[in-house]
């Protein structure tokens, strides 16, 4: 992967970046995403933020290689501290981190009630926590998509200022996902359902069918089955 050839995961993230955006990519990983968008003349300006000097050096090398010094800034900072008011950032990308870390970064970056025109978030884990943060902090989910990349399922959430009221199922599985029932999303949750059902069989075999663990897994199994059946209701 490089700035000219993004991974399927980052390519999906890129599709949600608005034309002429002023972008911050937090935890930029070589700045491949903003460099790609600038080389395609899709966005106007970008900051690639990194929390450590080593990754920041990699970002600067990519900027120099692509001759983007006037449009892409490498900046050391923890989360939103990498940006300055004069950057006039309107679009935020946080991709490739755990969902809990993403919510921590978002919370720190919104301490002054700042709102951005668009958040594009790709948590590797704990997607539910990210949806819950959006709901609690004045952002409406406007889209979400899942992709399979290198044997891993990744979900991209897109939000803009507004109001969201998720049901419990929507927090877990995503309202757009349940409505669309995309094959990759169904595959992911069908695989998870089969994994849980194997655990239930083992618990039954060990005479633990009345245990709290069995009850918890049984509830998860029912919830996944209901989500997979959502489109037919």
Image: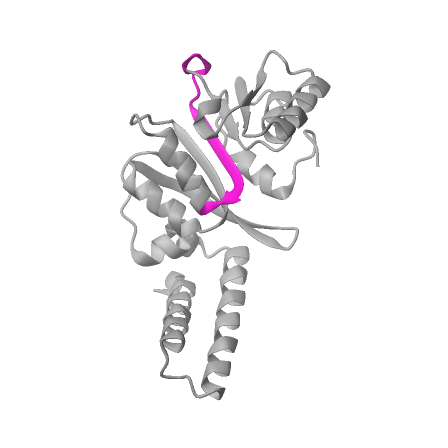
Please give left or right for residue 31 compared with residue 145 in the image: right
Q: Is residue 85 above or below residue 188?
A: above
Please give left or right for residue 105 compared with residue 114 in the image: right
Magenta segment: 85-99
Q: What is the quadrant of the C terminus in the image?
A: bottom left
Q: What is the quadrant of the N terminus in the image?
A: top right
Q: In this view, does 16 lie above or below 222?
A: above
Asked whether residue 95 is drawn in magenta, I would say: yes
The tally of labels here is 0
Asked whether residue 94 is drawn in magenta, I would say: yes
Instruction: Give the image location of residue 232, x and y in percent.
Output: 38, 65
**In this orientation, which residue lies closer to the viewer: 20 or 223?**
223
Please give left or right for residue 225 compared with residue 190 in the image: left
Quarter of the rendering containing residue 27: top right
Instruction: Give the image location of residue 137, x and y in percent.
Output: 30, 37
**In this orientation, which residue lies closer to the viewer: 125 or 186?**
125
Q: Is residue 12 above or below residue 87?
A: below
**In this orientation, which residue lies closer to the viewer: 179 or 155?**
155
């Amino acid at each position: 992967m490089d700035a000219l050839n993004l991974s399927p995961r980052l390519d999906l993230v890129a599709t949600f970046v608005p034309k002429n955006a002023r972008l911050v990519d937090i935890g930029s990983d070589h700045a491949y995403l903003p460099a790609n968008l600038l080389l395609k003349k899709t966005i106007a300006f970008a900051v690639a933020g990194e929390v450590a000097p080593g990754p920041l050096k990699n970002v600067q090398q990519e900027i120099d290689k692509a001759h983007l010094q006037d449009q892409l800034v490498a900046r050391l900072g923890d989360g939103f501290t990498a940006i300055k008011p004069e950057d006039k950032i309107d679009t935020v990308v946080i991709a490739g981190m755990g969902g809990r870390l993403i919510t921590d970064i978002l919370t720190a970056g919104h301490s002054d009630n700042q709102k951005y025109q668009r958040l594009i978030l790709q948590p590797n884990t704990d997607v539910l926590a990210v949806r819950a943060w959006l709901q609690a902090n004045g952002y409406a989910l406007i889209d979400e998509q899942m992709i399979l990349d290198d044997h891993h399922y990744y979900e991209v959430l897109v939000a803009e200022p507004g109001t969201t009221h998720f049901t419990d199922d929507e927090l877990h599985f995503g309202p757009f996902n349940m409505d669309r029932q995309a094959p990759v999303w169904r595959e992911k949750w069908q695989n998870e359902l089969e994994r849980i059902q194997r655990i239930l069989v083992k618990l039954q075999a060990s005479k633990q069918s009345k245990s709290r663990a069995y009850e918890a897994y049984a509830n998860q199994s029912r919830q996944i089955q209901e989500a997979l059946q959502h489109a037919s209701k």
